[in-house]
Amino acid sequence: MSQDSIWFATLNDTERAELQAFAGREVLTTPDVLIVGGGIVGAATAYSLSQQGVQVQVVEAGTVGGLASGANAGGIWPDQQGIEYPEAFRNLARRSRDLWGKLPARDGFDFDWRVNGFVTVDPMHWETSPEDLAMHLLSEGLSAHAIDGEQVKLLEPHLRSDITGGVHYPSEAHVHPVKAVLSFARSSTAQFSTETRAISMDVNNGRVQSVQTTAGTIQPGHVIAATGWMADWFAAKAPTPPPLIPISGQMIATAPQSPLLKNTVLGKAIVFQLLTGEVVTGGSMVEGDVTTPDAQVTADFAKMAGELLPALKDVPFPHAWTGARPTTPDRLPILDRLPGVDNFLVAAGHFKNGLLLAPITGELMTEWVVAGKPSLDLTSFRWDRF
């Protein structure tokens, strides 16, 4: 069984070569901005800064898009996710969804964007009825409506026949997350250097003077931490311990199948089908950085997928992989200056929503660097809120 995520397995030869080309690149020693972390948040931020003429160096300890960015579900789901979070999150999510929708028209962006919708069909996801859930969602400004069993069949005829209703989120979208990271990287003027790890930094008079990396010392004008839950390289300079932990999840995928699904479907677990035909399911949550798939979890998810989609009942799932979601105590990201360090910004802890929030995060970090402050009120995302 392959432990590589389906996102890397479905790259073409040209895209694989692009990833490999980042390895061994020399680092810029005095960039305007050093971004530590080459996942979706780091790449989107590099792109946004590049659009403003800022010279950017990105260092990534592993592969571009290689950790949480290459292990997630690929969902752009502001409406379905929004109900779990406060209005401050929903405002960011809506803005970021709009930014995602504009990117496919730009040169260099090719990441399987599709507005395919999202359908929730398992009663465990609503307290009383789909109608009540949909009304609550609408009252919060989220786009959703209740559907009955016949409408479920019209939307997704391959689901099991006894589903009596659900909630449809028609505006939800989906992307190939690794292709998205590559799109941001290739469309920016930033220097991306992989297999390059940040080790520590020197701070004097409230400013970062230099960052030590495995490729040498860098003296940037600003530093942006986009390293998910990994904060060891700057923790010694933080006023309080970084409030970041990993919460791991596992996903599995089939080989390419005939068309079975259009929407992302949430039963007991998320299930969706890629444009290349693979059916993907999963989404467990275990605190800690779990790096090896669990065979029992694979079996459980395969069973749930077969119950929801009878055509999958005896279909093997040869791909299984894990990823760690960077998480804060309230599951909202940190988007803030590091207290006491004027030129150090933190863009981390996005939990399940790093992909969704990447474009708006990049724009906000760019505003901080270029204009000295963001255009939005980010009180809910401060470092010192805990």
Image (cartoon, rainbow, N blue to C red):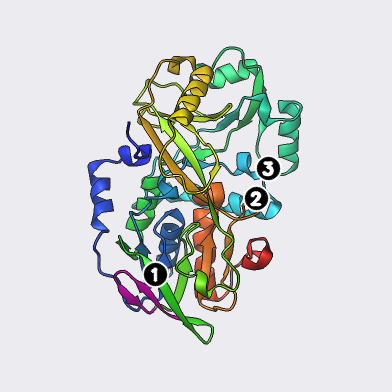
Q: Tell me which segment is drawn in magenta.
A: 209-219
Instruction: Please tell me which of labels 3 and 1 falls first in the chain.
Output: 3
Q: Where residue 274 sits in the image (x, y, percent)? A: 40, 32
Which residue has dot 2 on it? Answer: 90
Camera sees residue 271 = yes
Given residues 16 and 245, the one toward you in this image is: 245
Amino acid, disc 1: Ile
Camera sees residue 272 = no
Extreme-bottom residue of the structure: 205
Placement of the C terminus among the 4 image quadrants: bottom right
Given residues 164 and 170, the one toward you in this image is: 164
Quarter of the rendering containing residue 335: bottom right
Query: Which residue is drawn at the image coordinates 30% and 60% (left, top)?
Result: 195
Single out the mark in the foreground, 1 or 2: 1
Magenta stretch, main secondary structure, is strand
Q: Where residue 264 sits in the image (x, y, percent)? A: 52, 31
Which label sits on residue 354? Answer: none
Given residues 103 and 294, the one toward you in this image is: 294
Query: Could you tell me if the residues under marks 3 and 1 are in contact, i.e. CB atoms within 8 Å?
Result: no
Looking at the image, is 173 positioned above or below residue 298? below
Instruction: Please tell me which of labels 3 and 2 falls first in the chain.
Output: 3
Which label sits on residue 83? Answer: 3
Question: Going by the image, does 205 lie left or right of 141?
Answer: left
Amino acid, disc 2: Arg
Q: How busy is the neighbourhood of tag 1: few (under 14 within 10 Å), some, or many (20 plus)?
A: some
**Distance (Cα) linking label 3 and label 1:** 38 Å
Looking at the image, is 74 positioned above or below residue 168? below
Q: How busy is the neighbourhood of tag 3: few (under 14 within 10 Å), some, or many (20 plus)?
A: some
Quarter of the rendering containing residue 122: top right
Magenta region includes residue 340? no
In the structure shown, which secondary structural element does the residue marked by tag 2 occupy? Answer: helix
Which residue has dot 1 on it? Answer: 199
